[in-house]
Image (spheres, rainbow, N blue to C red):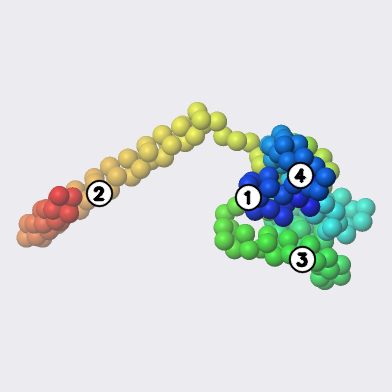
């Protein structure tokens, strides 16, 4: 019913009006509101759609674990492969990906990377395949959980400390630059000091004018 009477409709009103033959309108409205359009059903439907899409692009690594493949692709040297490379390597047959769904998904992954190359592996996975289960991450093999890929999340206290440290470093650099500038001015010939002082005065006045 969902695929025939709900999904083809673009709006909620269209769904309510698309009553199956032989069903009372009030019964259909109840079914739509309480079931088909409920949050729990939508979540289940999304999960099922995702699972079906994954079955249409199975990996082709045989019995070789993904971890071993990642190790061979650079992990042993401390440079594990990115998600796009792992997806291609685990879905290819020979030198090419042959499954149409896998080809389209690989193109999508590459496009997302081109748009934002700063995404981490877990961010890329979730952007292309949706939220991951607590006990599995697509494309990383059995036993790998999101927290294993995501890594530790810094606490607010750690972030606050890091920000304070950065501010302190910036203040120190500013103080050192100011002291260096004053030292340079002291070592200049008298005429040069006057010119430099006048230049600083003009620059300061210009800055004040811009602020106003």
| Residue 147 appearing in the image | no
Q: Are marks 1 and 2 in contact (CB under 8 Å)?
A: no
Q: Earlier in the sequence, mark 2 or mark 4?
A: 4
- Residue farthest to the right, as pictured: 63
Q: Give the spatial CA distance, label 3 vs label 1.
A: 31 Å
Which residue matches tag 3? 103
Q: Secondary structure at mark 4?
A: helix
- The spot of residue 207 in percent (x, y) is 17, 53
* Circle 4 or circle 3, nearest the eye: 4
Which residue matches tag 2? 180
Q: Give the spatial CA distance, label 4 vs label 3.
A: 24 Å
Q: Secondary structure at mark 2?
A: helix
Which residue matches tag 1? 11
* Circle 3 or circle 1, nearest the eye: 1
36 or 184, nearer to the observer:
36
Mark 4: few/some/many CA within 10 Å (<14, 14-19, 20+):
some
Which residue matches tag 4? 45
* Circle 1 or circle 2, nearest the eye: 1
How many numbered discs sit on the rendered protein?
Answer: 4
Q: Earlier in the sequence, mark 4 or mark 1?
A: 1
In the image, is 18 to the left or to the right of 199? right
Q: Earlier in the sequence, mark 4 or mark 3?
A: 4
Q: Residue at x 32, y 40 (%)?
A: 171
**Can you say whether 164 is above or below 104 in the image?**
above
Q: Earlier in the sequence, mark 2 or mark 3?
A: 3
Q: Earlier in the sequence, mark 1 or mark 2?
A: 1
| Residue 73 appearing in the image | yes
Q: Give the spatial CA distance, label 2 vs label 3.
A: 59 Å
């Amino acid at each position: 019913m969902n695929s025939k009477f709900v999904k083809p409709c673009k709006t909620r009103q269209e769904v309510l009006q698309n009553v199956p033959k032989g069903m009372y309108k009030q019964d259909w409205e109840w079914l739509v509101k309480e079931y088909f359009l409920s949050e729990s059903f939508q979540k289940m439907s999304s999960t099922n759609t995702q699972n079906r899409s994954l079955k249409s692009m199975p990996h082709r690594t045989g019995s070789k674990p993904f971890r071993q493949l990642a190790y061979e692709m650079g992990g042993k040297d401390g440079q594990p492969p990115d998600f796009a490379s792992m997806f291609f390597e685990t879905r290819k047959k020979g030198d090419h990906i042959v499954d149409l769904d896998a080809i389209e998904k690989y193109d999508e992954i590459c496009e997302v990377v081109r748009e934002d190359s700063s995404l981490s592996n877990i961010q890329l996975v979730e952007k292309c395949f949706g939220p991951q289960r607590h006990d599995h991450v697509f494309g990383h093999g059995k036993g790998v959980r999101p927290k294993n890929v995501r890594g530790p999340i810094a606490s607010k206290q750690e972030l606050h400390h890091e920000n304070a440290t950065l501010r302190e470093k910036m203040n120190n650099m500013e103080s050192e630059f100011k002291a260096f500038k004053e030292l340079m001015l002291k070592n200049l010939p008298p005429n040069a000091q006057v010119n430099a002082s006048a230049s600083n005065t003009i620059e300061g006045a210009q800055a004040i004018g811009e602020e106003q």
